[in-house]
Each structure stands twice: as structure tokens, then as C-alpha cells.
Image: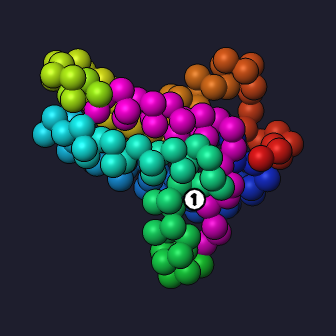
Amino acid sequence: MQGFTGLSDQDLWDLNYWLRLSPFLCAVWAGAGTLLGSPALLWALAPFAAAGALLRGHPFDAIYDHVVRHLLGSPRIPRYGRPRRFACGLATLWLLGTGWAFHAGLPALGRVLGFFMVGVQAVQVTTGLCLPSLTYQRLTRRTGARSAPEET
């Protein structure tokens, strides 16, 4: 669903929880920014989310790719497909908007936006279901993440 293609079932199993690391770290950071009502914290996270939308993967994946996977002997996190990059792009906009709400003196709106985002991330962290990637799949009528590799 998130656009990771060309992986064996075993590789997907080995990566299952590690694919949730970046969303977990983002959820903690966004939750702290929302709880504190801090536009600066939220805006500071936005470039990391944008990098996940524009690059091979999320900068937080480096924790796994450069340290953990060597200890476990497990595969690299593959290139992000369009659904996961869409999710990161959406998160970027959401973080900017949430930060703006706090900056503009609209703390109730900021809390609703921020905690909604954290809730969406919590779904992915706890279940592996990425709601923005699912939305991308529905919008583009793509089904089945195990299809032919995508152009990036």
C-alpha cells in the first residue's frame, strides 16, 4: 500500500516494524510541538517530512539503515514509492498549517490539526496502515503494492 515494491515476503516481514520508525519519531515530535503550542517545533519538523516526500526515503530512516540493520543483518529500507512520498508531502503541509495556526493565535485549531495528525501517525505506528498512502491509492485507483516497480 505504501509503494514498496520488489521485496520478498521475508524482507517485508523483516522491515515491518522498522518502516514505522520514522512515523513514530515524527508523531512524538509533532505531538510535543502540538502539546506545547510551538510553531517553531512544528516548522522545524517540516523539512524532515519534505525530505521524505522528495528524496529516496526519510532522513530518520538513516537510524535504521546505517546502524540497526547492520546489527540485525536485515535489508535496507527500500526507496519510497509514490504513496509514501505523498504521505510525507501531506505531513509537510499539515505541519506548516498546524504551526501557522499556533503562530496566528488560533490554539484550538492548532491542537485539532496537530492531534489529528498525531492520531493518523499513531494508526500507522500501531497497525502498519498508512492512511495517507491508502488515500493516495484510492485517489489514483492503484491497488496492490506488489505491482511492477515505479519510476522515481
- The spot of residue 27 in percent (x, y) is 33, 44
Which quadrant, please, contains the N terminus? top right
Which image quarter: residue 106?
top left
Q: Residue at x 60, y 72 (%)?
A: 74
Which image quarter: residue 144?
top right
- The spot of residue 20 in percent (x, y) is 46, 50
Residue furthest toward the bottom? 71
147 vs 96, left or right, is right
What is the chief secondary structure element of the magenta stretch? Answer: helix
- The spot of residue 117 in percent (x, y) is 35, 30
Q: Residue at x 58, y 22 (%)?
A: 135
Identify the colour scheme used.
rainbow
Task: Say which of 137 and 31 sits in front.
Answer: 31
Which image quarter: residue 103?
top left
Residue furthest toward the right? 148
The total number of labels drawn is 1
105 vs 18, left or right, is left
- The spot of residue 65 in percent (x, y) is 55, 70
Task: Say which of 46 and 83 sits in front.
Answer: 46
Tell me: residue 58, above or below residue 66: above
Q: Is residue 14 magenta?
A: no
Q: Would residue 111 be visible to someone looking at this image?
A: no
Q: Secondary structure at mark 1?
A: helix
Q: Would residue 147 be visible to someone looking at this image?
A: yes
Q: Residue at x 51, y 44 (%)?
A: 50
Task: Say which of 150 and 148 sits in front.
Answer: 150
124 vs 145, left or right, is left
Q: Residue at x 20, y 44 (%)?
A: 32
Q: Tell me where the magenta segment starts and ends, as one range.
A: 74-99
- Crowd rating for badge 1 (residues with CA inside 10 Å; few <14, some 14–19, many 20+): some
The residue where tag 1 is placed is 15
Three-letter amino acid code at disc 1? Leu
